[in-house]
Amino acid sequence: MKYMATYDLMETARNTNEWLGATARAMASYPVFALSANPIFQLTAAWGEVTERTFSRMVTKPDWGIRSIVGPDGTDHLVDITPVVERDFGNLIHFSVRRREKMARQILVVTPMSGHYATLLRPTVASLLPDADVYVTDWHNARDIPVSAGKFDVDDYVLYLVDFMRYLGPDTHVVAVCQPVPLTLAATAYLAGEDPAAQPRSLTLMGGPVDPDAAATEVTDFGRRVTMGQLEQWAIQRVGFKYKGAGRLVYPGLLQLAGFMSMNAERHGKAFADQVMRAARGETSDHDAHNRFYDEYLAVMDMTAEFYLSTVERIFKNREIARNDFTVAGKKVDFGAITSVAVKIVEGEKDDISAPGQCLAALKLLTNLPDDKKASHLEPGAGHYGIFAGKSWRLNIRPLVLSFIDANSGQPRKSPVKLAVTK
């Protein structure tokens, strides 16, 4: 079948490297080799350990790893992760804190569907949990979704967000990070036109490509240079026989990872070599800095072909969001319909993925939103990941976001009827 052989070839290469690593580690770890002073055995075992872990992580969904938080009473409170709305392509999950009263702040974190799992925002979620009830969009790996589940494109993504917002009710504050920023804005505009009572209280839009042409980056330049036909030919494959989604057209996670790695190949190569030397000296641990980073970075997921291609064509090439010419399920979405939802833009000064100006363009689209409902912040020295994780997020951005949420909370509003939880 077209494109299936290449998908299975990539998986075969990954599986073979994982096997080679495991074999080298096991062989070089035989006790008899400890009698030899030759360091080749320690280096071989170390190379095998790092290689096995590297290639096994590529097909493993990371755990959230948020077991508990310290509550206002100073004691540890266990955290349960519970799906509250379940769909074929993604769930709305709730980080439920035991023995804690309902918090005044209710936050929906909209995570990217751009190659990595929602757990990439683990630091963001963990830092918000002590001060809010947190809900997160948890997107599924397309390779595990049977073809019978149908398509999933940009329209479907927006409609999923609409359903999630309706479920949570109008006292929700939405925080969208990176790729979903323009689609979260579109979902809010859709609700403004179709179901105004279900709109959230506020939107915090962080480092997303609302107008990719506002500030060119390598990502936007690539979208301009490549035709849709070339992109479909180069990037799209069919899921192989190993997974439930066999036959589904996807943009494979392994192919995306190859692109990620090639952008900084020298740095990643040095990190791998350094980790091998540390392992040979017995200086590594399961959760050392290298493993914490690469366990997440290497864990990639497939995107449906229709979602990836429609994102490139509609958001980057045609700029439908930026031109206020976006439709969802055949209905025109007018960003001018947003008149009461407070919107805050957060950008990083050194963001080389969504450069400053791309996200800020959202405020220009909100022609009927009062100026006192608009806010923006440019974080000095912060790169793309720095705006939602790391020192800039912890010390500067997070307090600003929480203050913005509090300033736009007001009195509780009557919630619309909630959706039934579906499988």
Image (tube, grey):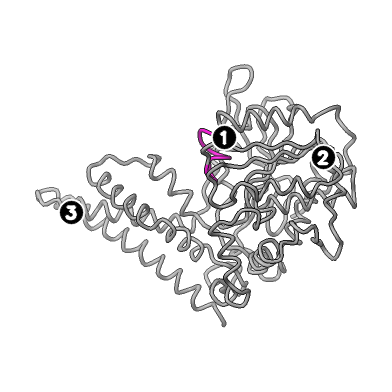
Q: Amino acid at mark 1?
A: Trp
Q: Is residue 21 magenta?
A: no
Q: Specify the farthest residue to the bottom.
A: 1
Q: Quadrant of residue 286?
A: top left
Tell me which numbered mark, 2 or 1, is placed earlier along the sequence: 2
Q: Amino acid at mark 3?
A: Phe
Tag 2, which secondary structure? Answer: loop
Labelled disc at residue 341? 2
Labelled disc at residue 219? none
* Percent of width and height locating residue 189: 83, 50
Q: Quadrant of residue 175?
A: top right
For this rendering, which residue is in front, 39 or 306? 306
Residue highlighted by disc 1: 393
Tell me which numbered mark, 3 or 2, is placed earlier along the sequence: 3
For this rendering, which residue is in front, 98 or 288? 288
Question: In the rendered structure, which segment of residues is drawn in magenta?
Answer: 383-393
Could you tell me if the residues under marks 2 and 1 are in contact, i.e. CB atoms within 8 Å? no
Residue highlighted by disc 3: 41
How many other residues sit within 10 Å of disc 1, few (<14), some (14-19) or many (≥20)?
many
**What is the distance, in whole Å, between disc 3 and disc 2 at their CAs?**
62 Å
Tag 3, which secondary structure? Answer: helix
Left or right of 289, for residue 315: right
